[in-house]
Amino acid sequence: MPNLTLRGCCIGTGRPKVIIPIVERTESAILKKAAAFSTLKADCVEWRADWFDAVSDVNALVHCLHGLRAALGEKLLLVTFRTQAEGGKKPLAQEEYAAFCTTVCASGCADLLDIEFFPNRKALPALIAQAHAAGIAVVCSSHDFEKTPPKEELVRRMTAMQQAGADLPKLAVMPRSRADVLELLAATAEMTDLHPETPVITMSMGALGGVSRLCGEAFGSAMTFANPGTASAPGQVPLDVVNAVLDSLAL
């Protein structure tokens, strides 16, 4: 499996790396949570900036980013603005989304930046290039909260992300049946076996898809999201359970 090393954390080799989300509304609450998370058994903290009440204030955004970087120490920081269309808290026009990405890149605080695939298809190569120029790796994400597309479509999306320059293609889909979970896992395995240019992050959401968040080492998903007390997506498994299962399933 390919790998990506950030702050000494090798993503794509061995045990899937664990991400825990911060979904607070104020800077004080965000930084308090970050300080608590800095001691937990997790590799990366995702800041869901779409939850931040002052996200549209550039100065407040930058100040919070610097606070997060200081609070997390050497733990990886993934910065995400999840738009409402992709399951997030707020809508954001394309120009505003690009400006958000520019601010994050200029801050020098993020290790990883989430860039949404479908809303940014035309601008994707430029947004990724901007992040890379700032030394930031890109998680390119696509979410489907209604269904699980066929395996061929899932693979097609992830390879398109790779071709645009993404470091970590990411898919989150909703299963309607057990077969849908298998479809997602088959697409993950195919990416790892046949398109190994990058690690990938995949998950089948909801309770039915919970197994997909735990078997990444066997099927090829390099990272997984865990619930440290407040979930940011349907079906996130509690952090202590994720760690226990990943340890027991280590290959």
Image (cartoon, grey):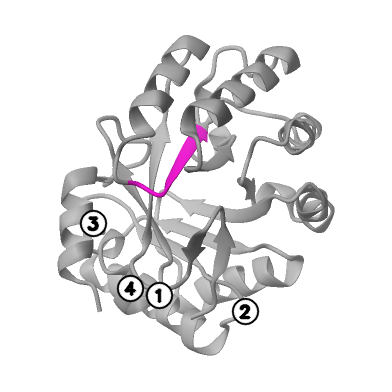
Tell me what residue is drawn at x 84 percent, y 53 percent.
126
What is the secondary structure assignment of the residue under circle 2?
loop
Q: Amino acid at mark 3?
A: Gly
Q: CA distance from mark 4 to mark 3?
A: 15 Å
Q: Position of residue 37 (x, y in %)?
A: 35, 32
Does residue 117 appear in this view? Answer: no
Q: In the rendering, which numbered label is found on residue 210?
A: 3
**Foreground label between 2 and 3:** 2
Specify the quadrant that holds the C terminus: bottom left
What is the secondary structure assignment of the residue under circle 3?
helix
Please say if 174 is above or below 44: below
Q: Position of residue 72 (x, y in %)?
A: 48, 33
Residue 211 falls left or right of residue 64? left
Between disc 1 and disc 2, whose residue precedes?
2
Q: In the rendering, which numbered label is found on residue 197?
A: 2
Q: Position of residue 155 (x, y in %)?
A: 54, 76
**Residue 35: within the magenta?**
no
**Neighbour tally class for label 4: few under 14, some 14-19, many 20 plus, Cα within 10 Å:** many
Q: Nearer the viewer, residue 74 or 68?
A: 74
Q: Nearer the viewer, residue 195 or 110?
A: 110
Tell me what residue is drawn at x 57 percent, y 31 percent.
69
Q: CA distance from mark 1 to mark 2?
A: 13 Å
Q: Position of residue 125 (x, y in %)?
A: 81, 58
The residue range painted magenta reads 42-47
Q: Which residue is mark 1?
A: 220
Between disc 1 and disc 3, whose residue precedes?
3
Tell me what residue is drawn at x 54 percent, y 89 percent.
194
Q: Amino acid at mark 1?
A: Gly
Q: Residue 70 occupies which quadrant of the picture?
A: top right
Q: CA distance from mark 4 to mark 1?
A: 6 Å
Between disc 4 and disc 3, whose residue precedes?
3
What is the secondary structure assignment of the residue under circle 1?
loop
